Amino acid sequence: MKLLLLDGHSLAYRAFFALPAENFSTSTGQHTNAVYGFTSMLINVLRDEAPTHVGVAFDVSRRTFRAAEYPEYKAGRSATPTEFSGQIPLLHEVLDALRIKHVGIEGYEADDVIATLTHRAVEQGHEVVICTGDRDAFQLVSDKVTLLYPVRGVSEVWRMDPAAVAEKYLVPPERYSDLAALVGESSDNLPGVPGVGPKTAAKWLGQYGDLAGIVAHVDEIKGKAGENLRAHLDGVLRNRRLNRLVNDLDLPLGIDDLQRASWDREEVHRVFDGLEFRVLRDRLFATFDVEADEVEGGFELEGEIVHADGLPLRFGDGAHGRQVPHGVVVTGHYRGGSGDAGAVAFAGADGVTGYVDLTTLTPEQDEVLASWLADPTAPKVLHDAKEQLQALSTRGLPLAGITSDTALAAYLVRPDQRSYDLEDLVVRHLGRELKAQEAAGDQGMLDFAPDDDTSEREAMVRARAVLELSEVLGERLEETGGTDLLRDLELPLVDILARMERTGIAVDEDALTALEADFAAKMRQAQLDAYEAIGRSDVNLGSPKQLQEVLFEQLGMPKTKRTKTGYTTDADALADLFAKTEHPFLEALLRHRDTSRLRVTVEGLIKSVALDRRIHTTYIQTIAATGRLSSTDPNLQNVPIRTVEGRRIRDVFVVGEGYESLMSADYSQIEMRIMAHLSGDEGLIEAFRTGEDLHRFVGARVFGVEPEDVTAAMRSKVKAMSYGLAYGLSAFGLSKQLNISTGEAQGLMDEYFSRFGGVRDYLREVVVEARATGYTATMLGRRRYLPDLVSDNRQRREGAERMALNAPIQGSAADIIKLAMKGVDAALRSEGMASRILLQVHDELVLEVAPGEREALEALVRREMGAAVAMDVPLDVSVGVGRSWHDAAH
C-alpha cells in the first residue's frame, strides 16, 4: 500500500507565483492560478504514483509553537497576498469533490501533520510519498519514504530518496535537520553560523556523528568557523528545536481514513464549472478510469441487430410503427463546410438496434434509409445533432423528426457546465459506462463477442445510450422548465444554423490579402517608431521582461501593478501609462499591439477561406451560459466594428455570386429595452414609446436639465451608466470607465436611481430572488444557476451578484435574436424567397439578398424581428444594405 501526502499550502503557493494571475481568473473575477496549478499537479502525481491512500495537509495560521518560542520565525516573509488566501477555500472544494481528505492543526504547520501521518503509515507497513516545497521534510526521507520536491513552479519535481538527499546535502536524511540548524534557513528566517556552509556543516557531522556530537566537541573545532560556532551555539540549538518536525500530533483522522475513494462526479462538475476548469476536468476524466462504484455497467444491445448487408432495413416493429423513438448516431466528421458520414447506427425502444454502412447500400436500401431519416413523423434523438445533420447532408441524406438533442438538453439543465461529452453525460446522468454488455438470458442476438470493440458495436452502444439519456434529461428539463426552450427554440435552430454554416459568407480574397500586407507594414512601422522613441532596437516588444526594463528603468515611468515577475505590462496598464505620460514609445507600442492583433485576425480569416471562396464559421449553442451563440473556426463575432481598422476587415465580407447585396439587420438598444420591460420603470418605457433619444432623455432627468441642454459629455456618462447597470457595474467600475472619482460615480448612480426607481427596485429584487431560488431566468424561462450567491467567499459572491443582474437581460437578448432567426427563416421559406441568412453576430443578422427581393426582404425582416417577442416597449430594428458587410452597416 502506498500513501501520498501533499503539503497543500506549499504547493499552492508555488503555483500562485508560477502561473500569471491575469491568465487564470473566472468570469466573475475570482483568481484561480493557485488552485489550478495545485490541481494540475495533483492529477499528475495521482497518475504517476497510483497511491492507495492520499491526504493533503494545510497550514492553519502563522501562529505556531515555533513563532511563540522565536517571534522572528518566518518574520522576513511578506504578507500573504489576498489573491492567494481567497483560493484556499477553493482548494478545499476541489479536494472535497475528489473525496480527498485534508487536515490542518492549529499551532502547527502542514509539515508536522505530514510527519505525524508518515510516522504512523511507516509503522503500519505503508510506503509513503510526500510532495512538498518545504526542505524541512527532507528529514522524513527513508527507505520507506520518498519526497517529491518541486523545482520549477509545479511542473518539475526532484524525486528524493535517501541516496539523492545524501548526494545533494552530503548527509543522510536523518541528519538533514542538524545540517539545516548549522547553516540556517532563510525562508524561515533562521540564521545559521556565519561562514559555515553545507560542506563545512556536513564535514562536522561526518566527523562527530550528529549535532549532539558537535556540541560535545565544540571546543575542539579550530579556526574562525569554530569561533563562530561557539558564539552562535544557542542559535543553532534553537534552530534544531524549531526545524524538527513533530510526529505525534493528535489528528482527527487515521491512515485508514485516507484510503482513496471514487470522486463525487456531480460535485466535480459543479466545482470545476464554477472555477471554469474545462480543460483540467477533461484531463482528470481522461487520466483516470471511472471508479467502479460510480457505474452499474454498460448497455445491453438487446433484440434484433439489423445490418444493411443483404437484409431489408427495418425501423420499428409492427406494433408501434414509426412512432417508436430511435437514438441515432452518425459516424464520420463534419467541420467548417467539409466532412462526410460513414455510417448510421440506431437504437429503438422496441428493441431494434442497427448499423448501416452507407458505402455498401444498394439503391433500394439507400431509398429506405433516406425516407426514414427524412420522415418528420419518425421521432429521433441525437447527441450534437447539428454536426451529424451536416455529415449526412454531404451524402445528400436529409434529417427530420429530431425530438431531442442530448447535448442541448444537458446544456439547458446545466448551462454553466463546460463540457457536454456523451461519455461523461452517460456516467453522470445514467450511472453507466459507454460500453456494451451481454444481454440477460437469450434475448440478445449479438453477433459480437462481449470484448469485441468494433466500430459497429461502439456506434450502436452510443445510439442506445443517447436514447436512454434523452429520457432522463427530458425529466430533468421538465423539472427545470426547459422543455419548451428545447422544443420551440434550440432544436429548430439546429437546422437553421446547419444551413448557415453550409452556406458561409463570400469574401474578397484579394482585398483580404492586401489587408494582411497593410497590417504587417503598419506593424513594422509601429515597431520602428517605438525603437526611435527609445533610441535602441534590441527590444522584443512582445517580451514583458524587456518592456519592464525599458518602461521602468530606462524611461523611469510610474510603476504599474506589481507581479511576481516585476510590474505588469498588460493592455490596461499600458493605456493608463500612456494617458499619464503621452510618451511616444507607449503610443507606438500600443499601435504595434493593435495592428498585430488585427493582422492575426486577418491571417486566420485567410486560412479559413474554403474552395468556394466563402468562409464557413461553426456555431455552437452550448458554450455561453446566457444562451448566446458562439462562433468558431473562425470566430466571426470577434471581428471588430467600432474601429476604423475593424470596419476595414468587415469590408472584405461581400455579396456572393448570383446575389444582389448583403443586408444587415439588428436591434437598437436591445438591452435597455429589456431593462425597461423587466423593471417596468415608467420613465424608461415612456422614452422608448415616444421615440426620444434614450440617453438624452435619461440625461435630462438625471442632470435636471431640458433635453436640448444635455451635452455630449452628459449623454456619454449616462449611456455608460445605463449599460453598466444592466451588466452589474459598480460605482468603482463606472469611475474607471468614465475616468471620474468613485464619489462622483456613486453620486451619478444615486441620482439615476432617484429618477428611475423602477430600475433600482428591479436590480435589488432580482438578486434577492436569485439568492432565494438559486437561479435567474430570462423572459423565456432560460435559467442561470448561481450557487455562489450564498458563498462565504466575498469575491465569488459579488461576482455571482453581478451575474444575477446581467443574466436575465443578456439571456433575454440572446433568446430574442434566436426567435428572430427562427421567424425570419420560416417566413423566407413560406414565401418562397431565395434570400438567405448568412450570419448571426450578437444582436445582428446578416443576410444575402437575392435579385429583386430587397424591398420584400427588408419588410419581412422588420416584421419578423419586430414581432419576435411581445414587450412593453417596441423592438426597434435597424436595417442597412450594401455590397459588403461594412457597406450594409447602419
Image: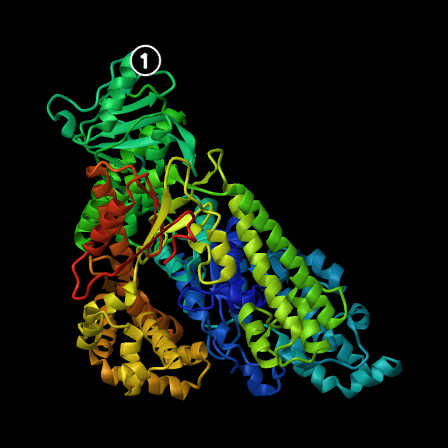
Neighbor class of circle 1 (other Cα within 10 Å; few <14, some 14-19, many 20+) is few
Q: Which residue shows up at 32% across the image and 39% down it?
A: 850
User: Where residue 535 sits in the image (x, y, percent)?
Assistant: 76, 71
Q: Which residue shows up at 28% across the image and 31% down it?
A: 328
Would you place residue 488 above or below residue 195 in this image? Answer: above
Going by the image, does 514 lie left or right of 100? right
User: Where residue 335 sits in the image (x, y, percent)?
Assistant: 43, 37
Q: Which residue is at the front of the view, 574 or 30? A: 574
For label 1, the SS is loop
User: Hey, which residue is sitting farthest top in the picture?
Assistant: 310
Residue 158 seen in the current view: no
Q: Which residue shows up at 25% across the image and 74% down it?
A: 763
Q: Which residue is at the front of the view, 744 or 839? A: 839
**Viewport quadrant of the C terminus:** bottom left
Q: Amino acid at mark 1?
A: Thr
Residue 148: quadrant of the picture? bottom right
Residue 872: quadrant of the picture? bottom left
